[in-house]
Amino acid sequence: MPDAEGAVPPEVEAKAMMDRARSHMRVGELEEAIPLCDAVYRRFTLSKSPALQLQVARALSQRGAAIAEQGMFQEALVHFDEVERRFWSPRKPELWEGVAWGMLYRARVLLEMNQEPMCSNWLERMLSRFGASAQRPDLRVPVEMARTAVLAAHNQAERFEESLSLSEALLKEYDGKADPFLVEQTAVALLQRAIALQGLGHVDEALEAFDEVDVRYCEDPDPRLRALVSTALMGRAIVLLREEFLPEALSALDAILEHAGPNPGRRLLEPVNFAKFHHEVVARQMQVERERTARRPKPRAVSKPKSR
């Protein structure tokens, strides 16, 4: 609320800016999020107010996550290092939210860099620090996201049995809840369960699990859920390609492109590029097979012996 002179208190202004930055990041608008993070950092980084220190920690964490999406992984890790160094203290619970986001984003970036052991280490440290406080409103979201991030770490390390077991446990906890955040976490757990089944070689179950993600969330306009559906469609296509079910694979590739639409966002580009490349390859394979079949000599008809 504005004070007596009508000015907005800096703590309120900084929080509003960082809330806007997070909203931009959620929909992939990184170019809009980064300047807001920069402004909060420049204006308030020397403040001794805990409320402003929290927003500076959020600014560093979110900026790190944003530039990581642009491929600047090492620069992002520097941001997370600063959050950890400046703001973590077990005696300052008012800053834990910013530290928790920094740890979560760091783990995600490490996983993107194929540094699964370090990713798992940070997730374990985060859950050890904050898991007992997960019911705090400011910590609930990053802690639950860390729990589902563990599934992706298990799958990247090919610990498929662990991922499958944990994903099924989380689905018992999340599935059916109306909370939009838990709906998203349900979708994440379903996707990671499908990947685990694929890794274990359970082809039919994996295809059904990828289909379930698509069927449940294909109409949802939320950008995160749209990205999860695209990843599930790509997972289905990968299974079909490996099993050499070419017509079905071609259909799955078409579904990726149809779901993304004519102007796919940044987070849909990987599945779209995958679909475009493999669509051409599969179509060529199918054409070669048709031509080979057409060139095969037809079996001669066997004439019946004349009756005497």
Image (tube, rainbow, N blue to C red):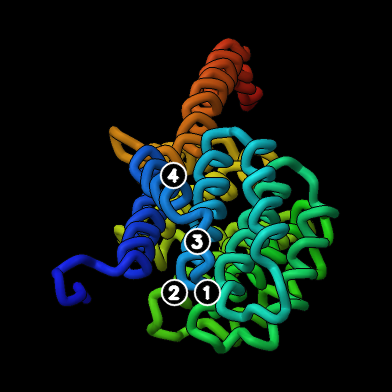
Residue sitting at x 34%, y 57%? 17
Residue type at tag 4: Asp
Q: Residue 120: horizontal and vertical position, in percent?
A: 79, 61
Asked which secondary structure carries label 1, the reply is helix
Label 2 and label 4: CA atoms lie apart by 27 Å
Answer yes or no: do the residues labelled 3 and 1 have beta carbons within 8 Å?
no
Asked which secondary structure carries label 4, the reply is helix
Residue type at tag 2: Phe
Quarter the N terminus occupies: bottom left
Residue type at tag 1: Val
Question: What's the mark number on residue 141?
Answer: 1
Residue sitting at x 41%, y 68%? 216
Question: What's the mark number on residue 181?
Answer: 2
Residue 203 showing in the rendered view: no
Q: Is residue 8 left or right of residue 259?
A: left
User: Comparing marks 2 and 3, which lies closer to the viewer?
Assistant: 3
Q: Earlier in the sequence, mark 3 or mark 4?
A: 4
Residue carrying label 3: 47
Q: Is residue 232 above or below residue 104?
A: above
Label 3 and label 1: CA atoms lie apart by 26 Å
Q: Residue 218: horizontal and vertical position, in percent?
A: 37, 58
Viewer-proximal residue, 163 or 278? 163
Disc 1 crowd, CA 10 A, few/some/many (<14, 14-19, 20+): some
Residue carrying label 4: 38
Work out which residue is located at the far front of the displayed protein and give it: 5
Viewer-proximal residue, 140 or 223? 140
